[in-house]
Image (cartoon, rainbow, N blue to C red):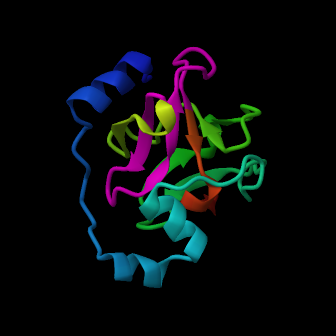
Amino acid sequence: MMNWNDVISYANNGSPAPEKEIRKSEKEWRDQLTPEQFRITRKKGTEVAFSGELCHVHEEGKYKCVCCDTPLFDSSIKFDSSSGWPSFTEPIVKNAIKYKKDVSLGMTRVEAMCNTCEAHLGHVFPDGPKPGGLRFCINSESIKLLKN
């Protein structure tokens, strides 16, 4: 199980290598995604708290990257953080997420990105439930649920 020290180490020293990499031009991403998905995943946007379609969904399945279909999170590790965004305790596999130090908005955070296509997903915080203590705070527009 991952913990905050793992996240900080990845953000400072590099994330685990992805299984594959997908790179597309801005035009290709714009053609594939809705305007809101593009704004969030490719321009590092965020959705308004509690507005995301997947915020209160608790059906069984796998959450995949909306850009490249990479499995990112399992519904069994989703929890209600009351933050206004879907929250997960850890990725489905160690190398699903790319971690990047984010110093925007006058604060230091750790950005969570799809490790396959570098889509912005959200951020990771050290205020999640035990035992790992992580909260992956993810935009609904950056993921899709493949129900079991």
Query: In the image, is residue 117 part of the stretch drawn in magenta?
Result: yes
Instruction: Name the spot of residue 29 as percent of width and height, x first.
Output: 40, 76
Query: In the image, is residue 12 part of the stretch drawn in magenta?
Result: no
Residue 135's image quarter? top right
Q: Nearer the viewer, residue 131 or 107?
A: 107
Q: Is residue 41 above or below residue 26?
A: above
Q: Quadrant of the N terminus?
A: top left
Q: Is residue 129 above or below residue 40?
A: above
Q: Quadrant of the C terminus?
A: bottom right
Q: Which residues are magenta?
A: 107-135
- 119 sits left or right of 9 in the view: right
Q: Nearer the viewer, residue 117 or 147?
A: 117
Instruction: Name the spot of residue 113 as percent of width and height, x first.
Output: 40, 48
Residue at image coords 45%, 85%: 31
Instruction: Name the spot of residue 95 as percent of width and height, x first.
Output: 32, 42
| Residue 116, visible in the rendered structure | yes
